[in-house]
Amino acid sequence: MGRGGPRGENTPRVAAGPIGRPLLLTAPAALWIALFTAAPFLLLIAVSFWVSGYYGTRPDFVLTNYARIFQNELYGLQLLKTLRIALVSTVLAMMLAYPVAWFISRRPPRQKTLFILVLFIPFWVNYVVRAFVWLPILGRSGAINSALMGLGVVDAPIDRLLYSEGAVIAGLVYVYTLFMTLPILLVMDRIDESVLNAARDLGATPLQLFFRVILPLSWPGALAGSVMVFLLTLSAYVTPQLLGGPSGLMFGNLIASQFLGGNNWAFGAALSCVLVLVALLLLAAAGRWIKLHRVLGGIA
Amino acid sequence: MSDRWAAIAQRTYVTMFLVALYMPLVMLVALSFNDSRIIGFPWEGFTVRWYLQVLESRPLLEAFANSLLVGAAAAAIATALAAGLGLAFRHEFRLKKLLFYAIVSPIVLPGIAGGVLLLLFFGLLGVPPKLLTTVLVAHVNWALPFAFLVLYPRLSRVDSALEDAARDLGATDLQVFTRVIWPTIWPAAAATFLFALSLSFDEFIRTIFVTGGERTIPIHFWILVIEELTPELPAMATTIVLVTVCLSALAHTFLRFSKGGANEQH
């Protein structure tokens, strides 16, 4: 988009200065990416085959780190649990977001802008803070327990609200819904009212309207949002660390503990590679239906 | 008739959704004034003492200064790199598609892996974790793809014929940049800078792996939550929210002001 078209061919002068030369313009960023993203990424893969011990981490080529992940079922179960939490959070976020996105997409332009702003503002709040607010909601002296006790529903505070898988899912959905609502909204925005009127005129019931018209037309947005939310929840660290307790810890916490506590870098690198691989497989699968840049366009 | 009920149901649902979205934040603000040593209920009376503690806290002020410093540096670098990329992407060149995927890859790379790989990289090179080295790199890595995605559609409107014309009239490259390109792109560059600044201000998951003694705001808050759970945390959170919302509102205003025509990437 926005390229000069045929103009570019007959102007050799464009190449005269650095501003006309893509190579020079891209060089600083390309160098940055090569040095600080590509090289560390290759190193991450390499270190996953290294050995960590009391003396530090040293180069080697062994499969013991991966063998440990696949032989000890603890890690497999942890990964399965993480995938389950990510899946449930994604589905919940989608179900919650769909009606909201639809409602906003049918507003007149000025109202639409206002509603989108209203959706955005809570997400300007740092996500550590957004996860933290669930402590005084779900905790022993939190809002829910106080309300339930005040109403006489329970006599003693319920401990299981916090530090459980449910708390993690609630927190994750709260922290990441915007990434679902926004892509759905962007796609729904393009659904023409006349298409809906045509369907109604032909006698479509509201259910038919949803399943036969709205859903097929907005599906790319929902898929883009799902990929985004699933990726974010898959590598969650803050929310499970704060709200999960021992039973709600996820794969990200397992990775972090190898670096922030255990100093087992090689094993941590192998765990990270497994996580990246799962994310890439997911993207590849989703890429069969949607273009990657649509996902990225949705959040930019 | 069923249409009316559907409309009412929809409005009720959206209202509930928005209440659920804002309620926790409203509660956070309310609790920041609660005169209780426990973060929670019951309500023990109104106080501003937690705010006084927060405002007097030197570590918080230092964290704020650190966040602003690394944020400004990261945003400047990310914006400059993205501007070069954006200007180049108006043309066709070899490996353009590969470069595009390399630029945006940090967005889809799990955040925790983005932090871990820098920890390994700097750790094995023996670079000690510092604000303006390791943390800065982590923040530029994170902000660059977004800076590019925000800036590129706005730069693609800058017609390269104008540059050609200026050059035909004898302008040097520096003149082409200062007289032709910069006057056209500065609102977009400013918007991108602010957006990148707010991303950096918010960054946690990559920073936690490469942070040294100098904490940023999210790191400082996190350590207090994990280690101490002190009663002034809601007041601190509210203060942080206030600052970041102002910052983001500023970025948002600029972004709308400099709204580009094209929103999709090719």
Image: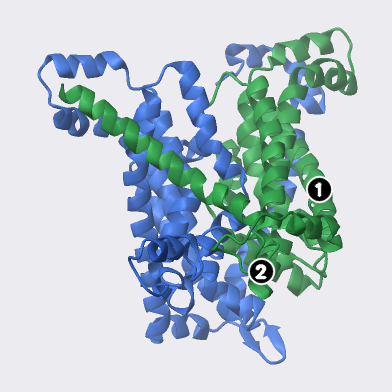
Q: Where is residue A59 in the image (x, y as percent from the top left)?
A: 66, 81
The residue labelled by disc 1 is B68
Which of A298 and A147 lies nearest the eye of the viewer? A147
Left or right: residue B264 versus residue B64 is left
The residue labelled by disc 2 is B37
Left or right: residue B138 versus residue A279 is right
Give the colouring mode of the picture: by chain
On screen, A295 above or below A33? above
Q: Residue at x 56, y 48 (%)?
A: B25
Q: Which chain carries label 1?
A: B
> Dot 1 lies on which element?
helix
Q: Are marks 1 and 2 in contact (CB under 8 Å)?
A: no
Q: Position of residue A259 (x, y in %)?
A: 64, 76
Left or right: residue B209 versus residue B41 is right
Which of A268 and B18 lies nearest the eye of the viewer? B18
Q: Which residue is drawn at 67% across and 45% down?
A: B199
Which of A187 and A102 lies nearest the eye of the viewer? A102
- The hue in which chain B appears in the rendered picture of the protein: green
Q: In this rendering, does residue A48 appear at all?
A: no
Alpha carbon distance from label 1 to label 2? 31 Å
Q: Which residue is drawn at 40% across and 28% down?
A: A104
On screen, A269 above or below B78? below
Q: Residue at x 27, y 33 (%)?
A: B9
> Dot 2 lies on which element?
loop
- The hue in which chain A appears in the rendered picture of the protein: blue
Screen quadrant of the N terminus of chain B: top left
Q: Which amino acid does label 2 sit on?
A: Arg
- Classify mark 1: residues with Cα within 10 Å, few (<14), some (14-19) or many (20+): some
Q: What residue type is labelled 1?
A: Leu
